[in-house]
Image (cartoon, helix red, strand yellow):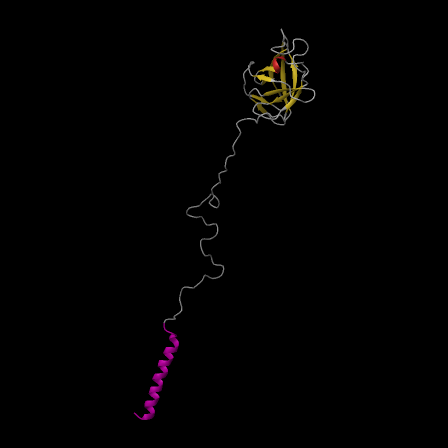
């Protein structure tokens, strides 16, 4: 082979080798077939609204949510001084004893309840409290009374007009009350009732019953 043909053959082989290296690229840097990130807009997890294997609530699963029950009161609220008014109804008298019914009216818009005796306080014309002893010993005993709007309840009151102990034997045994303050059972605020039934002897002792339907 001549020198010219040998050089040409070597050049052809070198060109083929160079072309092969250029088409393979840099070793170890072959492109990955897994994209590094998902295309824009593609979901990254389950579609929105797809049911979970363990839902934490009924939302989105087709189940009807269960409402939390609201506590129901066992009965009407207590009658308070804010909704009660009252009046005294005298009853028959005998041998130095006086009797009357305290009748109370529910002026509120909803029923209310009375259970018990409540409290009493005699008051003079100047607004000052007078001696009062409220005893709970008249029948009937307490029972639950539901007082409708505009409805009534009552309790019996009994007191004496004969002086006792160191009270004056002539004239009035005690100052003459003009008001009776009433505290409903289990309440603390009073409402006022006009008292025109004279002095209450025995240091203002009044015997009372529990409230009943009036």
Residue 82 found in image quarter: top right
Exactly how many numbered labels are in the figure? 0
Farthest left residue?
1
Judge whether residue 7 is colored magenta.
Answer: yes
Judge whether residue 205 is colored magenta.
Answer: no
Residue 4 picture location, percent across and down: 34, 92
Farthest right residue?
125
Please, is residue 188 above or below residue 200 in the view? below
Nearest to the observer: residue 19 or residue 25: 25
**Which contiguous range is marked in magenta?**
1-27
Q: Residue at x 37, y 81 (%)?
A: 18
Nearest to the observer: residue 86 or residue 196: 196
Magenta span: helix, strand or loop, mainly? helix
Left of 103 or right of it: where is 3?
left
* Quadrant position of the C terminus in the picture: top right
Q: Residue at x 34, y 89 (%)?
A: 7
Residue 71 picture location, percent across and down: 52, 32
Residue 123 picture location, percent across and down: 66, 20
Please, is residue 36 above or below residue 71 in the view? below
Nearest to the observer: residue 112 or residue 190: 190
Farthest front residue?
166
Residue 14 found in image quarter: bottom left
Residue 118 picture location, percent across and down: 58, 21
Nearest to the observer: residue 30 or residue 172: 172
* Quadrant position of the N terminus in the picture: bottom left
């Amino acid at each position: 082979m001549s020198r010219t043909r040998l050089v040409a053959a070597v050049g052809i082989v070198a060109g083929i080798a160079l072309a092969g290296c250029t088409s393979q690229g840099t070793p170890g840097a072959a492109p990955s077939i897994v994209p590094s990130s998902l295309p824009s807009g593609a979901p990254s997890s389950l579609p929105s609204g797809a049911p979970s294997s363990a839902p934490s609530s009924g939302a989105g699963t087709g189940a009807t949510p269960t409402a939390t029950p609201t506590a129901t009161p066992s009965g009407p609220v207590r009658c308070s001084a804010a909704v009660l008014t009252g009046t005294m109804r005298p009853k028959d008298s005998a041998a130095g004893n006086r009797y009357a019914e305290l009748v109370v009216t529910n002026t509120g818009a909803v029923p209310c309840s009375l259970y018990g005796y409540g409290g009493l306080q005699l008051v003079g014309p100047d607004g000052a409290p007078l001696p009062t002893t409220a005893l709970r010993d008249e029948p009937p005993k307490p029972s639950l009374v539901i007082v409708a709007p505009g409805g009534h309840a009552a309790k019996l009151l009994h007191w004496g007009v004969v002086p006792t102990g160191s009270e004056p034997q002539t004239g009035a045994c005690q100052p003459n009350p003009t008001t009776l303050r009433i505290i409903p059972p289990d309440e603390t605020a009073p409402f006022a009732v006009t008292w025109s039934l004279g002095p209450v002897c025995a240091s203002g002792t009044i015997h009372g019953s529990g409230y009943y339907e009036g």
